[in-house]
Amino acid sequence: MSTEERSHVSLVVIGHVDAGKSTMTGRLLHECGIVDDRTIDKHERESNALGLHPCSKFAWILDGLKAERERGATIDISLWKFASSTHDFTIIDTPGDRGYIKNMITGASQADAALLVVDATVGKFDVGMGREGQTREHALLAYALGVKQLIVAINKMDDGSVRYGEMRYADVRDEVANYLKKVGYKPSRVAFVPISGWRGDNITERSRNNMPWYTGPTLLEAMDGLTPPKRPSGLPLRIPIQDVYKIGGIGTVPVGRVETGTIRPGMTVKFAPSGIIAEVKSCEVHHDDKSEVGPGNNVGFNVKGVSVKDVRRGDVASDANDRPASSVSSFEAQIVVMNHPGRITRGYCPVIDCHTAHVACRFANIREKLDRRTGKVVEENPEYLRNGDAAVVTLVPTRPMCVEAFSDFPSLGRLAIRDMRTTVAVGIIRSITKDEVDRTD
């Protein structure tokens, strides 16, 4: 299939810390020829010198930061371009450590599909699926952020406590499937693939010797089976900013996924919530210059006369001449409380995760409590909310923030509410109140 015929899919890799996400992804990139043997050999020599597990030679493909390599754990997200026989993929590797969950949320907010990596090892699986486990929370967050297609890679099937066992695979698969059903996924539409990211079983080729009992797709085949989502058309430009770089000889380059609209050189963009306006000098996708970039693509664009300090993660770029995005003074959200130990009352101030933004917001009002099944109002102005309650609330950001109503821009209208290192609630934004202050003055 030619490049022109392939569809683009952004795939985020998620899961509990030390589930083998980076090792598995690095192995996939290597087996598909994206990373050569010379690079792998170099990583192997360097990781051996530090006394690390041999799997580091694959993990280091994704974990490029010095701190990541020393700790043996992913800290920030990394993006890689990868072409299969049917799709052009942007693979987004994310951290599993709870301390860096903001980076995982940033990666998931830019994805069309998710690859949930589950550690099948006896003991470690129970930790990942426990109440505080990141296997559970990552699946919940992915669904809440609009990632409705999912593949589950049941990893470390080669471990001594698993020994490529069919029964162990079935037990892990069934428990994960039951939880995914509670989250909102339909297990019948989820591909479960038993793999060894370290040994390479069922990554690109079927594991005939070690797992002859498995007759489903390989990981690569499951990825090829993903359906590219319908991209929104006719909407103004919106690009939530993931990162900002200063590149010598070029200048300031914000990076993010085009959610709606099209960006092209010569366009004047406005960044919200700051209100900064700048001209786009050039655009590129995975280091290839483009005359225009549409929805679903991760783009880097050079802007004229803007300092790297003027733009930050969580900002939103839009067309300054076509319904530009703006800062909000407040917004109304419909939420469901999932995991809070007590009562949520007016004045509560958790962190709101929406697209790539992470901002503390105050519950200014609890307007209505809803019936979760029918959506009908069951109580006006309730004093508090508890686990299981659905409600309409008014939230006020503690610092400038840009979000959109779900009905207008779905990808900028989904939110997760986090506090006490866990996901407290999820929901959508029903309406926004724009900030009347012009921040460019």
Image (cartoon, helix red, strand yellow):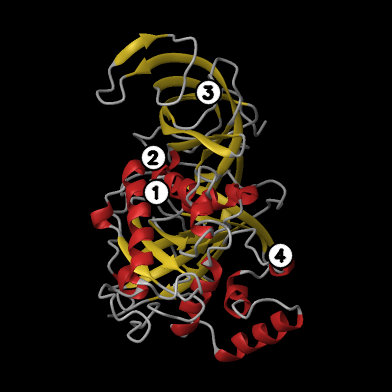
Residue that appears at 33% across and 82% down: 206
The kind of residue on which mark 4 rests is Arg
Q: Nearer the viewer, mark 3 or mark 4?
A: 4
Picture coordinates of residue 94 (x, y %)?
Answer: 55, 59
Q: Earlier in the sequence, mark 3 or mark 4?
A: 4
Residue 254 picture quarter:
bottom right
Q: Nearer the viewer, mark 2 or mark 3?
A: 3
The kind of residue on which mark 2 rests is Phe
Q: Is residue 98 found left or right of 192 in the rendered image?
A: right
* Residue that carries the numbered disc 2 in the rendered image: 409
Q: Nearer the viewer, residue 329 or 92?
A: 92
Distance CA(mark 3)–CA(mark 1)? 25 Å
Residue that appears at 42% across and 28% down: 335
Picture coordinates of residue 253 (x, y %)?
Answer: 62, 59
Name the quarter where the N terminus is drawn: bottom left
* Residue that carries the numbered disc 1 in the rendered image: 260
- Check if mark 1's residue and mark 4's residue have beta carbons within 8 Å: no
Q: Earlier in the sequence, mark 4 or mark 2?
A: 4
* Residue that carries the numbered disc 4 in the rendered image: 71
- Check if mark 2's residue and mark 1's residue have beta carbons within 8 Å: yes
Q: Earlier in the sequence, mark 2 or mark 3?
A: 3
- Check if mark 2's residue and mark 3's residue have beta carbons within 8 Å: no
Query: In the image, is residue 310 above or below residue 297?
Result: above
The kind of residue on which mark 3 rests is Leu
* Residue that carries the numbered disc 3 in the rendered image: 395
Query: In the image, is residue 209 above or below residue 298?
Result: below
Q: Nearer the viewer, mark 3 or mark 1?
A: 3
Q: Nearer the viewer, mark 4 or mark 2?
A: 4
Q: Is residue 297 visible?
A: no
Q: Earlier in the sequence, mark 1 or mark 4?
A: 4
